[in-house]
Each structure stands twice: as C-alpha cells, then as structure tokens.
Amino acid sequence: MVNLIDDPWIPVVRRDGTRETIAPWEITGGTEPAIRLDAPRPDFNGALIQFLIGLAQTAIPPGDNRDWRRRFKTPPPPDELKAAFAPYVHAFNVDGKGPLFMQDYDLSEGAENPVDRLLMEMPGEQTLKLNTDHFLKRGQVKRICRICCTMALFALQTNAPSGGRGHRTSLRGGGPLTTLVTGTTLWETVWLNVLPRDVFEILGNTARTADSDRFPWMGPTRTSTKNEVTAPTDVHPAQIFFSMPRRIRIDLDRPASGECDICGCASDALISRYITKDGGVNYKGAWKHPLTPYYQPKNAEEPLPKHGQADGISYRNWLGFVQNDPESRTQPALTVQVFRNERQRYLTDYLGRSAPLWAFGYKTDNMKAVCWNESTMPLIHVDDGIRERYEEGVAALIKTAGLVAASTRSCIKKALFGDRKDAGGNIPEVDSRFWQETESEFYITLEALREAMERGEDMTPLKLQWLSSLSGEATKLFEAYSQADLIGVADPRRIALSRRMLRNYISPRNKKIRDALDLPKDPDDGEAKPGKRPAKARGEHL
C-alpha cells in the first residue's frame, strides 16, 4: 500500500545535483538539502509544491512571525516533521481499503475514461468524437504508475477546467494562476508560503473539524446534482489546499505490467482507466486561495481569482502579482502580501537577500488547456519610507510599456492593412515579443529606480532612459513586421506614414506618454531634442 506521507514519492534535486525520491517529512533531511522538485512534468511540480505547502499549513502553521522566523532559520528535523504529519497519515492512502486520496468516497459507477484524460492537455470526449485531435493525439499515454497517477489526479483537482455539464471546476476556477515566494531550498520555498495560523484560519470555518471537512475524500461527497454549493463557512480552511471538485475513482483492480508512459519506471501495478461522474463539490462564495492573486470586477459581489493568459507571464503582470493594481482592482496573493509586509525585511536584513516570485498555471479555454505558463520575477525590497512612491514609479513604468506596446501593435497593423475593415485581428507575437525583449531592462530599471529614490535624485533621466529602451524595441518590431524591406509587395507610403505615427505615439512629448511617466513639458534626454521629428529616412516618400 502507498501512503503519501509515510512513503517516498516526491522527486527532488539536491544542492549537489543528486536526484532522489523522498517522503514529505524528509524535505529538511539529507547531507545536501533538497533545492527543488523534479517531477516529469512542470504541472506536476506545480501541484507537488502546493501539496507540500498545504500539508505544512495544515500540520505545523506558525503561531506568529517569531515562530515563523525560528523555523525558517532552523528547519525542523525530519523526525519532528514526521511526528507533526502523523495525525493525517490515514487520509493519504493511494490504494488499499477505505478512503483513497483525492478519490470519491463511494463512487461505484460512472463513465469510464482512459487514464490519459487525467492530464489537463489531453483531448476531451467531444474532440475525440469529432476526430479533431490534430496536435495532441489520443493514445500517447495508455498506462501510468500509481505515483504519476496521483500527481495527475491532484493536478487535475487543483486546476480543473470545465468538464461538461455538472463536472465542476477547481476551487479557483479553470486554470488558476499560482504565485509563490521561492527560497534557496525546498523547505524555504514551502515555509515562505505558509501563513500564520490566525491569518489562515479566517479563510474557512475552524469549527468544522471532521476529517472530511479538511480532506473531502474522507467522507461522502458534498454533491451538487441540484447545484448545491460549498462555501468557506461549510468546511475547514485546510480544504482550500485539498479541494476535490471532480468525482473520480481510479480503477486499481486491473493492474498491468510494463513501463509508465509518463516517467518510464517499470511497474507491475500500472493504471489504465478510471470512472467519473458529474455533481462533485461545487465551490462557490468568498473563497480566497492564499497562493493566487484576486481581482474585484465592478459588478461582482466577490473577488475572483486570476487565470492564465495565452501570451504568457511577464513583467506586465507585476501589477497584481507583486503590488496592488488599483486600475484593475487586483491584489497579490495573500502569501505574497504577508511576505512583503512582514517577512521580506527579515530576509534582507538578516540573510542579505530577498526572494524571487514563481508564477505558473494553465491557460484554459472552456474544457481545453491551451498552454502552460511559468516564469519568475524578482521581489525587490524597498524601505517603508519610499515604498509608496516607489510603487507609483513602477506602475508608471509598466503603464508606459503598455502604451508603447499598444501603439506598436496598431501601427504595424496600419502599415500592413491600412484602414481596411477586413484587416483581421492583431498579431499576437508582437505583444509577446515586446514584453519579452524589454523584460531584462525593466528589472535593471527597477533597481536603478530604488537606488535613485533612496538618494533623492531626479527621476526624469531614468524615465527617459526607460522610454528610450521601449522605443528602440518598438522600432525593431515595426521594421520586422511591417514588411518595410519588401518593397515589391508592400506599400511604401503607408509604411512611412505608419512609422511616423509610431514615432509620434512613443515620443516623450506625446501627452499620454508624458502623463504616464509624469515628465516635464519639455523633457530633454541629452541626445536629441525631444519632439523634433527625425529627418525622413531615405525612401520615405510622403
């Protein structure tokens, strides 16, 4: 029998490069510390880190910041963790008799599915029926081991998109974004995202202490065949990390021998199918997952979790991921807020470092996973005395980048199609390339902005330097996508007019740019007189 607390099943990489499989209570053990997860798929790594955070939050939440700092500085030894996790061992069986991890308590009949349907990206029933699985073909994953099955099951329950009528989405909706503060070891990453006990307990009902209130597979499912809902007041807050919107029962009675189609391990207990039924737990209400940013739509009663986008994760997401975004009414994840307000100074003052942010998640479209996004960004510590001004300055940099990106996109479209109404949509790669190519300069500018503010210097030269970087990339993208070098098929006049329009849009004299960066009316970058249009390039016949 496999137990997810007692038995080794979590793949990790240690500081010396050694790969090993450990039990959860061993994350602080070993001669060399485990520094990161090493699952065969990135979404499995995302699920595993949330599993470990949820387990630590449930079993050993810090009483206060002093308690948190003590365990961060001196991690609890494996035997202490094992003792702390012991009361929950019975709830984490993968096989055997009784309740099984993330599986419906007593489901005996339902629709039979091949095991690959546990994977988010695999084609669904309608896709298979219409024979439109052109890019992700059926039948690539036929048999998997129990550990990969467990990872897939947890990843699905955590990220579940719409699965058809009555098949519920995850507690955070389909394809939620997750943002984590990361440390130099696996333990640090887990502990940096565990909230103080009093902060976490307000996210649910601590009076609900039954096993099934924490771990929903431990009792009959709170079904929703008549659209019944489960709100935070109905269950213990621990269920946030162990939510179970899908009714699933793995077929363990017909094991096969061979190699796992995901990790390649040899096993005589491979799994090939499962059954599922609609009407699982329907999570509605004021849920607030501590690892996800939330935004407040104007006409919605409750904040909604942020979801992934097809163009990936970049510094354009800084507002809402790292600091509040008043315009979109987005707040960072609760763990990020606690870190920046209460823990970041400790890391900077006593350890001489801060910690980066790890953001990841699926972009889903109805019942389909479109892509997996993953990225990291630095979390820069600033003194409380300048933090408000600093965050306003950062917001101005990002707003300006958004203006330049939009101008670049529209001018390229105008160069290609003019004013044609049938011009079609935008060119998605223009936006993604713009944000990607300017990202490294953005983080350099963030550090320079902090240093300049601490010294009380004028910000104008720094702002103009940032605008110059944005303008340079905008010009490169325009030349690359406007067909300016294809004179035989392009319209030189239209291209030249669009190029001039772009220069005007991204000039420091442009009112929108000037207002976004709070520039003086006559900014001077020391190289050219702002606002004076450069001479026509050769071949620009207007």
Image (cartoon, rainbow, N blue to C red):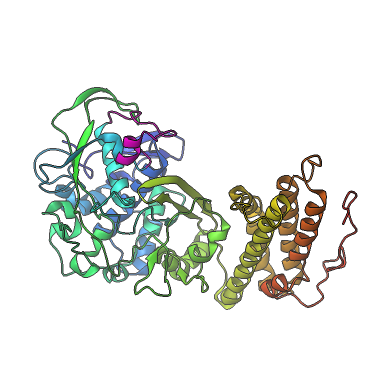
The x and y percentages for residue 89 are: 17, 48
Residue 128 shown in magenta: yes
- Can you tell which quarter of the image residue 201 is in? bottom left
> Which residue appears at 52% of the width and 51% of the height?
312
Residue at the farthest front position = 421
Residue range (magenta)? 121-144
Q: Looking at the image, is 401 positioned above or below residue 198?
A: above
Instruction: Name the residue nearer the viewer: 192 or 432.
Output: 432
Q: Quadrant of the C terminus?
A: bottom right
In the displayed structure image, the side of residue 268 where residue 453 appears, left or right: right
Asked if one can make out residue 161 in the rendered structure from this viewpoint, the answer is yes
Query: Closer to the camera, 17 or 31?
Result: 17
Residue 122 falls in which quadrant of the image? top left
Relative to 123, is 237 on the left or the right? Answer: left
Residue 436 image position (x, y, % from top left): 61, 50
Instruction: Report whether 21 appears left or right of 111.
Output: right
Q: Give the prevailing secondary structure in the magenta stretch.
A: loop
Q: Is residue 213 above or below residue 123?
A: below
Q: Residue at x 18, y 59 (%)?
A: 224
Residue 32 can be seen in this image: no
Is residue 338 shown in magenta? no
